[in-house]
Image (tube, rainbow, N blue to C red):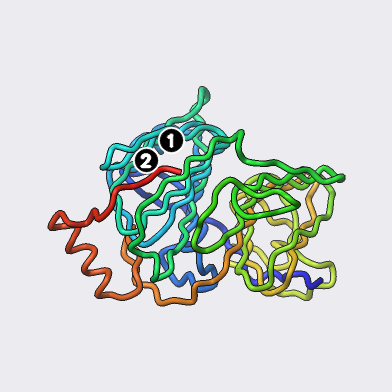
Amino acid sequence: MSIRPVKRIIQSQPTLEGAGVKLRRAFGFGNTEEFDPFLLLDDFRNENPEDYLAGFPWHPHRGIETITYVLKGTVDHGDSLGNKGTLGSGDVQWMTAGSGILHQEMPKGDGNGKMHGFQLWANLPSSKKMTDPRYQDVPSKEIPEVQDDDGTTVRVVCGEFWGKRGPVDGIAAEPRYLDVWVPPGKRKSLKVETYRHAFAYVFDGSGSFRDASQPLPVKTDMVGTSAGEVLNNVGNRSLVLFDNGDEVTVQAGDAGIRFLLVSGQPLEEPVAWYGPIVMNTKQELQKAYDELRNGTFIKHGARVG
């Protein structure tokens, strides 16, 4: 086994999206080659309703898949074809935009005003950019949860892990999407196939992601913090991008650590990207926006499941 060294550590940055929703962006809208096939990760955890209730009114998508994972509160969603639903605590929606869809997402907090969750964008290969749109709404009870002898707990949203397969299927990038909890003081190694790009996003507790013998320094985007300090205390809202290897090793801190562990096979295709539409060439991108203006953007109805 070869432990994946840490390639970069990034602190998510405040961003405004939708109709003025305040969130944190871990990566996206830049050079995302290191994250291929993933394009963007937004952390929309918030406890002030004024910062999120305006939501994400009607907007288009083409050429990508969006993965919404709700921890607290609810998200009402609907599209221009009449499909609609509500995501609650622990639920997941995997939307394949494909050839094009117009939809909206309107968050609501829980009884204490808390709205917590994440949205990840995955790119579609050129051969599936114009596929039929598709929804997969997955209730929390259908997401398998496995626990190891040391108390490490993993929710398997997508892909296979520890003998369990997540309910989301048919995804072009063949990703693995895990919600991992490692108890205080425990050290855990988690397998990740060598051909995949992989990252972790920490959202509770703290810890370190490295082999004890890993040399320093490592690149960090956390201003004012040395690489050594980061490696030994990666905490809330920190994204850890891994280099090559076939497993990730984490040492949990005194409060334990919870993080998303996401990996996928790189597409290695050109990316032409503007706003919510991602194609392979500038010509395809221009055509998409021309169709949006002239009313021919929607090609197919969206199917559910």
Contact between marks 1 and 2 (CB within 8 A): the answer is yes
Percent x, y of residue 186: 84, 50
Percent x, y of residue 253: 78, 50
Q: For the point 54% across and 35% down, which residue is it?
A: 139
Residue 166 appears anywhere in the view: yes
Q: Which residue is mark 1?
A: 75
Q: For the point 47% across and 35% down, which residue is it?
A: 87
Residue at the farthest right position:
149
Under tag 2, what secondary structure? strand
Q: For the point 70% across and 41% down, which residue is it?
A: 145
Amino acid type of disc 1? Val
Residue 224 appears anywhere in the view: no
Instruction: Identify the image quadrant of residue 287.
Output: bottom left
Amino acid type of disc 2? Glu
Residue at the farthest top position:
111
Q: Which residue is mark 2?
A: 105
Q: Nearer the viewer, residue 68 or 8?
A: 68
Looking at the image, residue 130 sits to the left or right of residue 72; the answer is left
Q: For the point 55% across and 48% down, which residue is it?
A: 168
Under tag 1, what secondary structure? strand
